[in-house]
Amino acid sequence: MRAEMQECSVCERTVRQYVRERKTVLGLVVNEVFVPQSYDWGVEAQVDWYEAAADLNGERITLQVFSMRSMARRFSKHINWRSAFSAGYFASSVTTILKLR
């Protein structure tokens, strides 16, 4: 832009507007349509399970991590265990799910 308009000093907003216009002219703009997501309180949550490595008492171990986040409020729960099959894993998961309701 400065090469094309050396006589002008421009602000960030002007640069963004120029880039948007150039992309339109070059056919690089794709109009995207989206639907904002909204959730009823305590109805839906995002849940992830994954493995994480941690150093405990100088030993590297693999932990199973359970992570849950409510989609409509600022509640999240992160729990880890050495074994994905432990009773505590399932008990804590159920307790967490019930707290969301």
Image (cartoon, grey):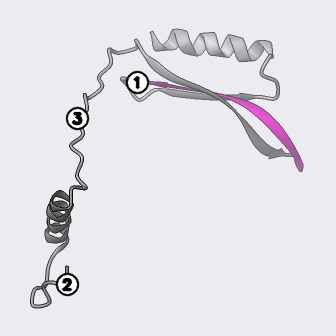
Q: Is residue 57 visible?
A: no
Local crowd at mark 1 within 10 Å, few (<14), some, or many (≥20)? some
Q: How far, Cα to Cα, is label 3 from label 1? A: 21 Å
Asked if marks 3 and 1 touch (Cβ < 8 Å), the reply is: no
Q: Residues within 10 Å of mark 2 (few under 14, many from 20)?
A: few
- How far across and down, in percent of the image, does residue 63 sit? 77, 34
* Among the two numbered marks 1 and 2 on one chain, the one whose residue lies closer to the N terminus: 2
Query: In the image, which disc is placed on residue 33?
Result: 3
Q: Secondary structure at mark 1?
A: loop
Q: Which residue is mark 2?
A: 2
Which residue is located at x 41 percent, y 29 percent? 74
Residues tagged 1 and 2 counted as in contact (Cβ below 8 A): no
How far is the residue under mark 3 from the one under mark 2? 33 Å
Using residue 24 as the reference point, say whether residue 49 is left or right of it.
Answer: right
Residue type for callout 2: Arg
Q: Position of residue 17 (x, y in %)?
A: 14, 64
For residue 38, what is the image quadrant?
A: top left
Query: Looking at the rendered structure, which numbered label has been put on residue 71?
Result: 1
Which mark sits nearer the N-terminus, 3 or 2? 2
* Residues in magenta, as a range: 57-71
